[in-house]
Image (cartoon, helix red, strand yellow):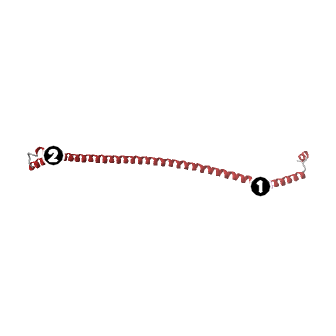
Protein backbone atom coordinates (compact mmCIF):
# COMPACT_ATOMS: atom_id res chain seq x y z
CA UNK A 1 0.00 0.00 0.00
CA UNK A 2 2.88 2.26 0.59
CA UNK A 3 3.89 1.79 -2.93
CA UNK A 4 0.42 2.80 -4.04
CA UNK A 5 0.64 5.97 -2.00
CA UNK A 6 4.03 6.75 -3.44
CA UNK A 7 2.93 5.97 -6.97
CA UNK A 8 -0.08 8.23 -6.86
CA UNK A 9 1.57 10.81 -4.64
CA UNK A 10 -1.23 10.85 -2.07
CA UNK A 11 -0.78 13.17 0.85
CA UNK A 12 -2.80 12.05 3.91
CA UNK A 13 -3.19 15.44 5.37
CA UNK A 14 -4.35 16.90 2.10
CA UNK A 15 -6.70 13.95 1.58
CA UNK A 16 -8.27 14.37 5.02
CA UNK A 17 -8.56 18.13 4.49
CA UNK A 18 -10.31 17.51 1.15
CA UNK A 19 -12.63 14.96 2.76
CA UNK A 20 -13.49 17.47 5.52
CA UNK A 21 -13.99 20.23 2.92
CA UNK A 22 -16.14 17.90 0.82
CA UNK A 23 -18.20 17.01 3.93
CA UNK A 24 -18.66 20.72 4.77
CA UNK A 25 -19.70 21.54 1.17
CA UNK A 26 -21.97 18.52 1.14
CA UNK A 27 -23.50 19.57 4.47
CA UNK A 28 -24.02 23.17 3.29
CA UNK A 29 -25.49 22.03 -0.01
CA UNK A 30 -27.71 19.57 1.80
CA UNK A 31 -28.80 22.05 4.45
CA UNK A 32 -29.31 25.20 2.35
CA UNK A 33 -29.92 23.97 -1.19
CA UNK A 34 -30.96 20.36 -1.43
CA UNK A 35 -33.26 20.20 1.63
CA UNK A 36 -35.33 23.32 0.69
CA UNK A 37 -35.32 22.17 -2.93
CA UNK A 38 -36.62 18.74 -1.86
CA UNK A 39 -39.33 20.42 0.23
CA UNK A 40 -40.39 22.52 -2.74
CA UNK A 41 -40.33 19.49 -5.03
CA UNK A 42 -42.33 17.40 -2.53
CA UNK A 43 -44.87 20.21 -2.17
CA UNK A 44 -45.01 20.57 -5.95
CA UNK A 45 -45.52 16.81 -6.33
CA UNK A 46 -48.30 16.86 -3.75
CA UNK A 47 -49.93 19.83 -5.52
CA UNK A 48 -49.73 18.00 -8.84
CA UNK A 49 -51.22 14.83 -7.35
CA UNK A 50 -53.93 16.90 -5.66
CA UNK A 51 -54.65 18.72 -8.93
CA UNK A 52 -54.86 15.43 -10.81
CA UNK A 53 -57.24 14.03 -8.18
CA UNK A 54 -59.36 17.19 -8.38
CA UNK A 55 -59.34 17.03 -12.19
CA UNK A 56 -60.45 13.39 -12.02
CA UNK A 57 -63.19 14.31 -9.54
CA UNK A 58 -64.30 17.22 -11.74
CA UNK A 59 -64.36 14.92 -14.77
CA UNK A 60 -66.48 12.40 -12.86
CA UNK A 61 -68.83 15.17 -11.72
CA UNK A 62 -69.04 16.46 -15.27
CA UNK A 63 -69.85 12.99 -16.60
CA UNK A 64 -72.46 12.53 -13.87
CA UNK A 65 -73.93 15.96 -14.60
CA UNK A 66 -74.02 15.17 -18.32
CA UNK A 67 -75.78 11.89 -17.60
CA UNK A 68 -78.27 13.65 -15.31
CA UNK A 69 -78.87 16.30 -17.98
CA UNK A 70 -79.49 13.63 -20.62
CA UNK A 71 -81.86 11.84 -18.25
CA UNK A 72 -83.74 15.04 -17.53
CA UNK A 73 -83.94 15.86 -21.24
CA UNK A 74 -85.32 12.40 -21.99
CA UNK A 75 -87.82 12.73 -19.15
CA UNK A 76 -88.87 16.15 -20.41
CA UNK A 77 -89.27 14.77 -23.95
CA UNK A 78 -91.39 11.90 -22.66
CA UNK A 79 -93.51 14.31 -20.60
CA UNK A 80 -93.92 16.62 -23.59
CA UNK A 81 -94.97 13.70 -25.81
CA UNK A 82 -97.42 12.55 -23.17
CA UNK A 83 -98.89 16.05 -22.84
CA UNK A 84 -99.19 16.36 -26.62
CA UNK A 85 -100.90 12.97 -26.84
CA UNK A 86 -103.29 13.89 -24.03
CA UNK A 87 -104.04 17.20 -25.77
CA UNK A 88 -104.75 15.34 -29.02
CA UNK A 89 -107.03 12.90 -27.24
CA UNK A 90 -108.81 15.72 -25.46
CA UNK A 91 -109.15 17.67 -28.70
CA UNK A 92 -110.59 14.56 -30.38
CA UNK A 93 -113.05 14.08 -27.54
CA UNK A 94 -114.04 17.74 -27.60
CA UNK A 95 -114.35 17.63 -31.39
CA UNK A 96 -116.57 14.55 -31.11
CA UNK A 97 -118.60 16.26 -28.38
CA UNK A 98 -119.01 19.38 -30.52
CA UNK A 99 -120.09 17.21 -33.47
CA UNK A 100 -122.61 15.39 -31.27
CA UNK A 101 -123.93 18.70 -29.93
CA UNK A 102 -124.18 20.07 -33.46
CA UNK A 103 -126.06 16.94 -34.56
CA UNK A 104 -128.37 17.35 -31.59
CA UNK A 105 -128.97 21.00 -32.43
CA UNK A 106 -129.60 20.11 -36.08
CA UNK A 107 -132.07 17.43 -34.98
CA UNK A 108 -133.78 19.94 -32.69
CA UNK A 109 -133.96 22.53 -35.45
CA UNK A 110 -135.24 19.96 -37.96
CA UNK A 111 -137.81 18.70 -35.45
CA UNK A 112 -138.91 22.24 -34.67
CA UNK A 113 -139.14 23.04 -38.39
CA UNK A 114 -141.18 19.87 -39.05
CA UNK A 115 -143.44 20.68 -36.12
CA UNK A 116 -143.85 24.22 -37.37
CA UNK A 117 -144.64 22.93 -40.86
CA UNK A 118 -147.22 20.51 -39.45
CA UNK A 119 -148.74 23.33 -37.38
CA UNK A 120 -148.80 25.66 -40.40
CA UNK A 121 -150.38 22.86 -42.47
CA UNK A 122 -153.07 22.40 -39.81
CA UNK A 123 -153.65 26.15 -39.68
CA UNK A 124 -153.87 26.31 -43.47
CA UNK A 125 -156.31 23.39 -43.55
CA UNK A 126 -158.42 25.11 -40.90
CA UNK A 127 -158.31 28.36 -42.84
CA UNK A 128 -159.20 26.52 -46.07
CA UNK A 129 -162.05 24.72 -44.29
CA UNK A 130 -163.29 27.99 -42.90
CA UNK A 131 -162.97 29.61 -46.31
CA UNK A 132 -164.69 26.68 -48.03
CA UNK A 133 -167.46 26.65 -45.45
CA UNK A 134 -168.06 30.36 -45.89
CA UNK A 135 -168.03 29.86 -49.67
CA UNK A 136 -170.43 26.94 -49.35
CA UNK A 137 -172.68 29.04 -47.15
CA UNK A 138 -172.55 31.92 -49.54
CA UNK A 139 -173.18 29.69 -52.55
CA UNK A 140 -175.91 27.80 -50.83
CA UNK A 141 -177.57 31.05 -49.82
CA UNK A 142 -177.54 32.26 -53.36
CA UNK A 143 -178.83 29.00 -54.83
CA UNK A 144 -181.34 28.21 -52.20
CA UNK A 145 -182.25 31.62 -51.01
CA UNK A 146 -185.65 31.50 -52.51
CA UNK A 147 -186.37 27.78 -52.12
CA UNK A 148 -185.12 26.76 -48.68
CA UNK A 149 -186.01 28.17 -45.36
CA UNK A 150 -183.63 28.82 -42.49
CA UNK A 151 -183.98 25.43 -40.72
CA UNK A 152 -183.08 23.47 -43.82
CA UNK A 153 -180.25 25.91 -44.43
CA UNK A 154 -178.76 25.29 -40.97
CA UNK A 155 -179.02 21.53 -41.38
CA UNK A 156 -177.22 21.62 -44.72
CA UNK A 157 -174.47 23.85 -43.33
CA UNK A 158 -173.93 21.63 -40.31
CA UNK A 159 -173.87 18.51 -42.48
CA UNK A 160 -171.33 20.10 -44.82
CA UNK A 161 -169.12 21.26 -41.93
CA UNK A 162 -169.22 17.80 -40.37
CA UNK A 163 -168.20 16.27 -43.71
CA UNK A 164 -165.32 18.75 -44.03
CA UNK A 165 -164.11 18.14 -40.50
CA UNK A 166 -164.03 14.40 -41.08
Q: Main secondary structure of the magenta part?
A: helix
Task: Tell me the tag on residue 138.
Answer: 2
Q: Nearer the viewer, residue 10 or 107?
A: 107
Task: Tell me the tag on residue 96.
Answer: none
Indicate left or right for 162 with 46 as reference: left
* Residue occupying the point 37% across, 47% down: 98
* Residue occupying the point 44% across, 48% down: 87
For marks 2 and 1, the one nearer the N-term is 1
Q: Is residue 64 magenta?
A: no
- Residue 162 location in percent, x, y? 14, 47
The kind of secondary structure element at disc 2 is: helix
Residues in magenta? Answer: 31-36
Residue at mark 1? 36
The kind of secondary structure element at disc 1 is: helix
* Residue occupying the point 29% across, 48% down: 112
Q: Nearer the viewer, mark 2 or mark 1?
A: 2
Looking at the image, which residue sits at the far front? 146
Amino acid sequence: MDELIKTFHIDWKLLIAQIVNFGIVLFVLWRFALKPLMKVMDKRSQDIVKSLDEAKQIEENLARSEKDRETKIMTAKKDAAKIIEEAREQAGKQGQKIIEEAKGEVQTIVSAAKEQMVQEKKNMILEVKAEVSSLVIATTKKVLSEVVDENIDKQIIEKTLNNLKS
